[in-house]
Image (cartoon, coloured by chain):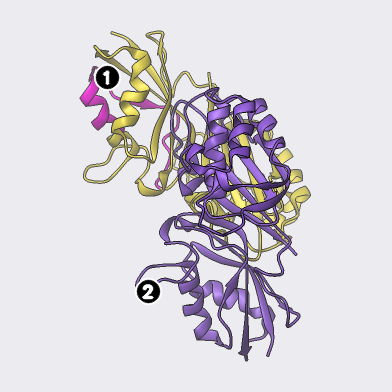
Chain colours: A yellow, B purple
Amino acid sequence: MPNIKLIIEYDGGGYFGFQKQPNLPTIQGELERVLNDLVFLESPIYCAGRTDAGVHARGQVVNFKASTRVPINRLPAALNARLPSDIVVKHVEVVPEDFHARKSALKREYGYYIHNASYPPAIGRQYCYHYPLKLDTEAINQSMRLIIGTHDFSSFCRTEEGKSYLREVYEAYCRALDDHQVVIRVVANAFAYMMMRMLCGSLLEVGRGRWSVPYFQEVLQAKDNSLSAAALPPEGLVLEKVYY
Amino acid sequence: MPNIKLIIEYDGGGYFGFQKQPNLPTIQGELERVLNDLVFLESPIYCAGRTDAGVHARGQVVNFKASTRVPINRLPAALNARLPSDIVVKHVEVVPEDFHARKSALKREYGYYIHNASYPPAIGRQYCYHYPLKLDTEAINQSMRLIIGTHDFSSFCRTEEGKSYLREVYEAYCRALDDHQVVIRVVANAFAYMMMRMLCGSLLEVGRGRWSVPYFQEVLQAKDNSLSAAALPPEGLVLEKVYY
């Protein structure tokens, strides 16, 4: 029974997140529906990162066990012909039996896209957050250097009693893509629930000058999410890549 | 009576082009509707380039004469608050009385965006054309160098008896934006009807190897649009900038 890995891209704007929910459009629900046309699923569909409602992915990874008479290399075209246009299979391969999209993942990379101009965006408005105040990207980068390494991110995620929020961050930086687009990019072993959106909300407080870099560090060290800025909306967030 | 110039961006996907048409959503129609809330229009709304149905603009320029009690620098925010989210005013200024968005324009810049991968795009699919065959961008660039200068573009536009299709091209090149996005960019004094889309369709014939560069030159010199490849669809085309 082959273990099949897919790399998928999606515009999450029309979905209630990756995870299947009864009577609601979800990425997993759509995938399952079209896979059932083509293969006999012998396991659930596992994913590398359960993106929330409205969050996008350019490199989500899923795997499942299935028997199929469709040749593996024809699966992307067959799936894409059946999937709605906002979900695309970019790559397929047969992987070793013990490969698990979530458990085998070593690193995840997320990008948060900000349209930083006085006027809102029209082209691509579905894929960014409009922030009209001028941003000091150097101050944002100074704060982002403080999260590199292993830290408890309790201040920047939705927490539950008894869970660990220790995460290891490998890369974290912000950069201008053109004269008005800014991306905040973080590569970490894993991300806690709402971590990227609460972190980015707090980094914008630094960028606009309301928080100092030392205050950002204080909030990080406090392990208290009541100190975080509000989470940014989902439309700016993209799961870029998963590393194995 | 001030002559007012606006720079506007729009996602043309929901519109039947710039030019006003009865009972159809158009960019001009939307602009006129919201301007009538704020100013007293004393002239038509002129634009630099009448984009077709489905074509986008990042830097369309319009002008009109109007009396207004709204301070000019507050117009963008007031207009953006009333416009649908797919049309945005980026800039406003009062210009000399003889400024005319179309007649005063010296150069226009258009980009045609191609998603060149075996799989279709999900994120940003509204703003590009999916072309799955491998493209030789060097052969495309060799052909594009042949259109620089003044040429009769009758082969690459919809023609009408008695009109001139002489246009002067200042810049023309194709380049990869990342591992799967390619843009074809042309700067010219003016563009004839369907010119960019027929030209790009023909350049893809060169890029895929069905047309040679000398054959492209032959078609250009033939001044016969029955030789052109089919026009590409509107969603890949963006009016980037107008130069005065």
> How far apart are the alpha carbons under marks 1 and 2?
55 Å
Q: Is residue A192 visible?
A: no
User: Is residue B80 rendered to the left or right of residue A103?
Assistant: right
* Residue A157 vs residue B88, the one in the foreground: B88
Assess whether residue A43 is covered by the magenta stretch: yes
Per the rendered image, the range of residues in magenta is: A31-53
Look at the image and tell me in which quarter the C terminus of chain B lies: bottom right
On the picture, is A5 further left or further right than A32? right
Q: Residue at x 57, y 28 (%)?
A: B206
Which residue has dot 1 on it? Answer: A43
Above or below, A89 against B51 in this view is above
Above-or-below relation of B29 to B129: below
Residue with the mark numbered 2: B22
- Give the amino acid type for the residue marked by disc 2 in the picture: Pro
**Image spot of residue A226 (x, y percent):** 55, 55
Q: Residue at x 22, y 42 (%)?
A: A22
Q: How far across and how far down the image is residue A110, in percent?
A: 56, 37
The residue drawn where x is 50% and y is 71% is: B28
Q: Is residue A170 visible?
A: yes
Q: Name the subunit of mark 1.
A: A
Kindly state the secondary structure of the residue where label 1 is placed. Answer: loop
Q: Position of residue B212 (x, y in %)?
A: 60, 24
Residue B73 sits inside the magenta stretch = no
Which residue type carries mark 1?
A: Ser
* Quadrant where the N terminus of chain B is found in the figure: bottom right
Question: Dot 2: few (<14), some (14–19), or many (≥20) neighbours within 10 Å?
Answer: few
Pointer 1 with pointer 2, Cβ within 8 A? no
x, y percentage for residue A27?
Answer: 34, 37
Q: Are marks 1 and 2 on the same chain?
A: no
Q: Nearer the viewer, residue B58 or A125?
A: B58
The residue at the point 61 percent across, 87 percent down is B66
